[in-house]
Image (cartoon, helix red, strand yellow):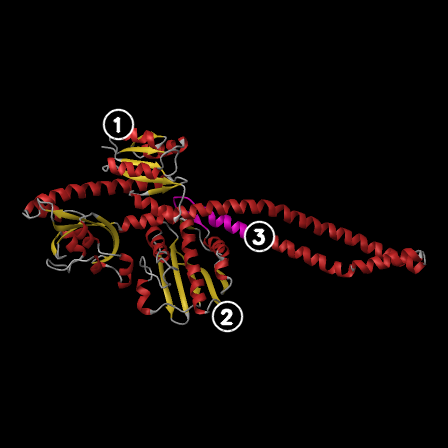
Amino acid sequence: MKATLLIVDDELPIRKLMTRFLEGAGYECFTAPDAESAKEALGAREFDLILTDLKMPGDSGLELIRHCKKHYPQVGRIMITGFGSPDVANEIMNVGVYGYVIKPLSQNVVLITVGNALRHLRLDQHMQAYRQELEKKVRRRSEKLVAIMDNLHAGVMMVNTDMEIMEFNQRMRHWFGDIQPGDRASCYQTVVDEEQEAICGDCPMAATLADGITNEVMRICRTNEGKKEFRIITTPIRDESGAIYAGLALYDDITEKMALERDLRQAQKLEAVGQLAAGIAHEINTHIQYVGDNISFLKESFEDIAGFLRVYERLWRQLQEDGAVPAELDRELTAEKERADLEYLWEEIPVTVNQSLEGVRRVNTIVRAMKDFSHPGDEEKSPMDINKMLESTITVCRNEWKYVAEMEKDFHQDLPAIPCLAGEISQVFLNIIVNAAHAIDAATDGGREGKGTITVQSDITKGGVAIRISDTGGGIPKNIRDRIFEPFFTTKTRGKGTGQGLAIAHRVVVEKHQGRLFLESEEGRGTTFIIELPEVEG
């Protein structure tokens, strides 16, 4: 049975566009132009999901979401907004939505967000139904209930009011094999790093048992399968008198979903920046072209005028020698020549014009690089000139490295065209070059101890190409090199690094392009990242 969606937006083109996206994917769609109409529609029929604009005449999208959450809790909620700031995002998430979409709308983003929201909705519905079932049967510990728990894809754990583990299903045993009944339960037992405890906040189960409320948190946990991101929902279990005697925790593995959402946010960010950069580049290019043409015209005109004046000067000297120039006129011409300092102008004006033309050519190079780098590319791989992509990336991020490093390039001139997603591979190059600049910046105290060197090389390998990006920074300690591509791991100080750049780069190169990304490093000497891309698409 296909899901039924209600789309609320005061702009008719947005409603039509979203309807086309979603009906094309097999959903049944209804629309409303404002919150009041949406409330009438919600009262008239059942919906699986509501998608509402944030800013609308009358009640806002936030007010509509609150109304829907209160009166129709079984309906999933998605916010549509043109405002992508962290404050707006936090406000949207705090009101209780399953996701949000940032305008301008992208079909892939809309479909993935709706799909994720419906999966969250089903999980919540399942959690609610399962909780009701557990409240009736948990004390009897029937075989049927145990079988249900063990066949869930989500992890389930029950604890008593002393925070001791009473029960857990097979999925929890699979992820956290060392837990045992009677162990003290705490989300801190599974947090990746001790320093993360400050980020985690209070244990959600403790708050659930104390206050009798359902909590939902995100946690990064270390499991037998490596680090994972979990959506953890804790809810109280009450006896017939209403007293809380236990708590239930549901662990939903959202690692892949969060990775996809981060990629989507990065893609949205790059697309928006790309559109802006392409527009700016176009505007600059339009004006710089006629500036260059005018300077070229002035150069040619000056050469013509200079030639004429030199002939005139020879004639004047000849007339002086013949005594044919009136004394008063001769004095006036001599004074004017000395005032104008013609010899200086003959020497400096061509230099000034040539420098201006060189500046125009430099601006043209930067504009072309901006246009190449900002192009979003196709959703499918296409053969690309890797050297050109490297040149554009180096030019675009020049401001990151020019104060701390010299850039050396060694490109193989006969590289084969490599099938790739140009936008994503360019972002890989950008992340690694910027990281190289940051490493040199840290090693040279911001360039005050002398500039370092970033070397970018390309070469042919058996079956493809290799790109080597080297820096003369401080290198990477041996004890953390194996973790350098892990999500959330960063060597930068808190607030300066998210631990996502190299993790995304590794996923793009290895998973999306069937290539290799690895590093060579020597402490005190620097680091080299090697990217290998196959010539034949895998």
Q: Can residue 95 be seen in this view?
A: yes
- As measured in the structure, the alpha-carbon distance from the residue carrying label 1 to the one carrying label 2 is 72 Å
| Mark 3 crowdedness (10 Å alpha carbons): few <14, some 14-19, many ≥20 | some
Q: Residues within 10 Å of mark 1 (few under 14, many from 20)?
A: few
The answer to whether the residue labelled 2 contacts the one labelled 3, judged by CB atoms less than 8 Å apart, is no
SS category of the residue bearing label 3: helix
Compared to residue 246, the image places residue 60 above or below, namely: above
Q: For this rendering, which residue is in front, 470 or 287?
A: 287
- Amino acid identity at mark 1: Ala
**Disc 3/disc 1 C-alpha distance (Å):** 61 Å
- The image shows residue 405 at horizontal and vertical percentages of 49, 65
Task: Identify the magenta region.
Answer: 364-384
Q: Name the residue under label 2.
A: 450
Report the residue marked by disc 1. Answer: 44
Dots 1 and 2: beta carbons under 8 Å? no
Which residue lies most toward the top here? 44
Q: Position of residue 90 (x, y in %)?
A: 34, 48
* 150 left or right of 487 in image: left
Q: Quadrant of residue 516?
A: bottom left
Looking at the rendered structure, the kind of residue marked 2 is Gly
Return the disc, 2 or 3, that comes first in the chain's sequence.
3
Which residue position is annotated with label 3? 363
Query: Is 488 situated left or right of 186 in this image?
Result: right
Foreground pick, 59 / 215 = 59
Q: Which of 291 and 512 is in front in this view?
A: 291
For marks 2 and 3, give the CA distance: 28 Å
Q: Where is residue 310 in the image (x, y as percent from the top left)?
A: 81, 56
Q: Which of marks 3 and 1 is nearer the N terminus?
A: 1
- SS for tag 2? loop
Mark 1 or mark 2, whichever is nearer to me: 1
Q: Is mark 1 on a helix, strand or loop?
A: helix
